[in-house]
Image: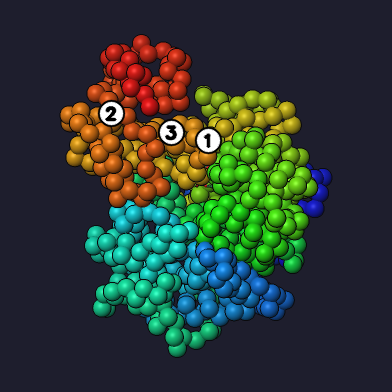
């Protein structure tokens, strides 16, 4: 299977073709996959409702396309290399054949636990290769997986389980993360106190902890797969059947379940993977993301396996046991494509170049970044010290909702402009809109980034609440999918993502809604009201600044801060903890009672002298107090 574009001229040609005849374009690509029954229609769509159907009538199974399809040609090729948290521990390598057997066995185990097609299964696991088996096992039987990042709290997990009405949870006794260990099973037990839909918990032994098991509900992974056959016919799935749900934060309310469907997601994950990273047959590809995020779904598991690539999975963190770990792993496994986040690059850059020295990075061909805008300094360091100025950097822009990479260079074939994600992939019809929703056609402009035509891996709905999907993504600008990002276009049409224009904060590439964090803070009994904004942070990109009104001014501010951080950790997870908490007696509000976040943002950014028009404020004196107390 070769979906690869091999030159810039070919990209331009394919792009033009994809706009001129989208159905013909995607039909050709889709034909290269295994279909149990051919589709009758490539695309049907309407953005207003929204209703989008790709490859209708077709039957297929993603795990079959990830595994069975490769067995003849690449059965003995390594599919997954696993690098453990401890550098000296044993590396695991599973060939496509072995992975196929494990997935079939696990799929049979799921079935024998009474889990069937359409059931939702929450996965809360460490970055071990069995996590990939868990995803593919669900895919094989048509169960809908919803991976919850193992840094989320019990309460956050319970919300997701309840929203999805999941029937099963797959977890492990615990996990290793650098020098820390986390008791995952206990967190699952706590979450399940608040969930009645779950009948089965499968527990993988990872640390040898032997956690307490609830009779009739819990079963060990090892026991569940024992005696299971290594054959399991892939469930025929409609192209538009639910494939997975992944929860993500928006500007309002609780995180929403972004729904992806089978056929379109499959095609786009593979197509984008092969073109962005340009892997060759014997290459080793490494994406450092966690499978708990969309990047891990599309570019550790599905994109690479659909493409028959070798995907490296890493259990640990970039700075353990020291800040040279990434480079040591690149050297050890002779990594060819390396894909990470700007926040990791900045953190490692700050630790000093001595950590890069002594590691042979000559195997690297393509470097990638994802998750947030990359600043010029980090880009230059990555280019110079890691890529030795011979590797193209693909700055890949996408979202949980887009399923796959929308804007990026294609290996070495695209023009590269530091800090710019670049050009859209074929099939992706981007536009910049002004405040009134009018398309801005010229270059060297800035606007709201929208997409005007469907692509195969786009969000289909928000689980259990289609209206929300419509409101959040398709109502701001009629006939367009609104990304929530602002972007600039340079003289050559290359895009540079500026960042979110809504109330979403991106901390180290992780999305949080201000409302979600405020709701958590407000559960603290000291708190009357709060307002949260993002502010620039040298390593994390953005960090969280909370303005908090208490019942009475706290006598011990340090203690009050700790207790606020504690509720955020409990409700969401430590990853969402505010870096700065300022106690205030009032918040700047409009006469209609709306918090003026623009003002709070400026203050958090240290730009209190640029507050702009404050005449619409109910009580302008509040601002003076907030500015004076700013941290
Ligand atoms: C941001 C992560 C700049 C953006 C894949 C987007 C980026 C949000 C980039 C989605 C990039 C992602 N340059 N910003 N290359 N990639 N973003 O859903 O604001 O976790 O809307 O998906 O991350 O975050 P999500």
- Distance of mark 3 from mark 1, alpha carbons? 13 Å
For the question of whether residue 404 can be seen, the reply is no
Q: Is mark 2 within 8 Å of ligand 1?
A: no
Task: Determine which residue is flagged by label 3.
Answer: 534
Q: Which residue corresponds to the image point at 33% horizontal and 48% vertical from the top-left? A: 569
Q: Is mark 3 within 8 Å of ligand 1?
A: no
- Front residue of 230/54: it is 230
User: Number of numbered discs present?
Assistant: 3
Q: Secondary structure at mark 2?
A: strand
- Front residue of 351/611: it is 351
- Distance of mark 3 from mark 2, alpha carbons? 16 Å
Q: Residue furthest top?
A: 615
Which callout, 3 or 2, points to the residue nearer the camera?
A: 2
Estimate the x, y position of residue 90 in percent, counting from the top left: 57, 73
For the question of whether residue 616 can be seen, the reply is yes
Seen in the image, is 509 located left or right of residue 278? left
Estimate the x, y position of residue 196 in percent, counting from the top left: 25, 64
The disc at residue 583 is 2
Q: Secondary structure at mark 3?
A: strand
Does residue 82 lie above or below 230 as drawn? above
The disc at residue 538 is 1
Question: Image quadrant for the C terminus?
Answer: top left
Q: Is mark 1 within 8 Å of ligand 1?
A: no
């Amino acid at each position: 299977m070769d979906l690869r574009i091999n030159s810039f001229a070919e990209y331009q040609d394919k792009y033009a073709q994809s706009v001129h005849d989208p159905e013909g374009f995607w039909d050709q690509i889709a034909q290269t996959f295994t279909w149990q029954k051919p589709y009758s229609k490539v695309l049907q769509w309407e953005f207003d409702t929204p209703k989008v159907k790709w490859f209708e009538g077709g039957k297929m199974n993603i795990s079959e396309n990830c595994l069975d399809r490769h067995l003849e040609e690449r059965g003995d090729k390594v599919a997954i290399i696993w690098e453990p948290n401890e550098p000296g521990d044993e590396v695991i390598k599973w060939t496509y054949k072995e992975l196929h057997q494990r997935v079939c066995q696990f799929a049979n185990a799921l079935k024998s636990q009474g889990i069937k097609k359409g059931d939702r299964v929450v996965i809360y696991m460490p970055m071990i290769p069995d996590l990939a088996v868990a995803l593919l096992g669900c895919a094989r039987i048509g169960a809908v997986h919803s991976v919850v990042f193992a840094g989320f709290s019990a309460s956050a997990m319970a919300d997701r389980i309840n929203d999805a009405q999941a029937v099963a949870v797959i977890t492990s006794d615990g996990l290793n993360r650098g020098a820390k260990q986390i008791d995952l099973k206990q967190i699952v037990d706590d979450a399940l106190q608040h969930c009645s839909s779950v009948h089965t918990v499968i527990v993988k032994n990872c640390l040898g902890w032997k956690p307490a098991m609830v009779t009739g509900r819990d079963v060990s992974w090892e026991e569940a797969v024992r005696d299971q056959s290594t054959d399991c016919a892939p469930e025929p799935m409609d192209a538009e059947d639910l494939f997975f749900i992944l929860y993500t934060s928006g500007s309002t309310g609780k995180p929403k379940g972004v729904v992806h469907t089978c056929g379109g997601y499959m095609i786009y994950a593979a197509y984008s993977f092969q073109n962005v990273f340009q892997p060759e047959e014997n290459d080793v590809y490494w994406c450092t993301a966690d499978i708990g995020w969309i990047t891990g779904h599309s570019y550790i598991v599905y994109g690479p396996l659909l493409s028959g690539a070798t995907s490296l999975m890493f259990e640990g963190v970039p700075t353990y046991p020291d800040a040279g770990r990434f480079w040591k792993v690149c050297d050890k496994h002779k990594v060819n494509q390396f894909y990470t986040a700007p926040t990791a690059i900045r953190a490692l850059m700050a630790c000093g170049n001595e950590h890069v020295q002594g590691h042979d990075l000559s195997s690297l061909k393509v470097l990638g970044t994802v998750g947030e805008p990359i600043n010029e300094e980090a880009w230059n360091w990555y280019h110079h010290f890691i890529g030795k100025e011979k590797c193209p950097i693909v700055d890949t822009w996408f979202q949980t909702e887009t399923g796959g990479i929308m804007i990026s260079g294609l290996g070495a074939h695209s023009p590269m402009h530091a800090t710019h994600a670049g050009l859209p992939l074929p099939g992706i019809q981007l536009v910049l809109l002004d405040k009134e929703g009018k398309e801005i056609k010229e270059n060297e402009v800035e606007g709201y980034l929208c997409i005007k035509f469907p692509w195969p891996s786009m969000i289909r709905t928000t689980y259990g609440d289609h209206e929300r999907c419509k409101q959040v993504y398709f109502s701001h600008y009629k006939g367009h999918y609104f990304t929530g990002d602002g972007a600039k276009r340079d003289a050559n049409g290359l895009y540079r993502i500026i960042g979110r224009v809504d109330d979403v904060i991106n901390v180290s590439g992780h999305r949080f809604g201000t409302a979600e964090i405020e709701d958590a803070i407000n559960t603290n009994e000291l708190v009357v009201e709060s307002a949260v904004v993002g502010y620039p942070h040298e390593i994390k990109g953005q960090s969280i600044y909370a303005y908090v009104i208490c019942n009475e001014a706290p006598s011990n501010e340090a203690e009050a801060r700790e207790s606020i951080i504690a509720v955020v950790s409990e409700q969401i997870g430590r990853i969402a903890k505010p870096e700065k908490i300022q106690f205030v007696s009032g918040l700047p509000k409009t006469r209609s009672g709306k918090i003026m976040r623009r003002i709070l943002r400026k203050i958090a950014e240290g730009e209190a002298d640029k507050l702009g028009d404050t005449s619409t404020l109910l009580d302008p004196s509040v601002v003076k107090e907030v500015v004076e107390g700013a941290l």
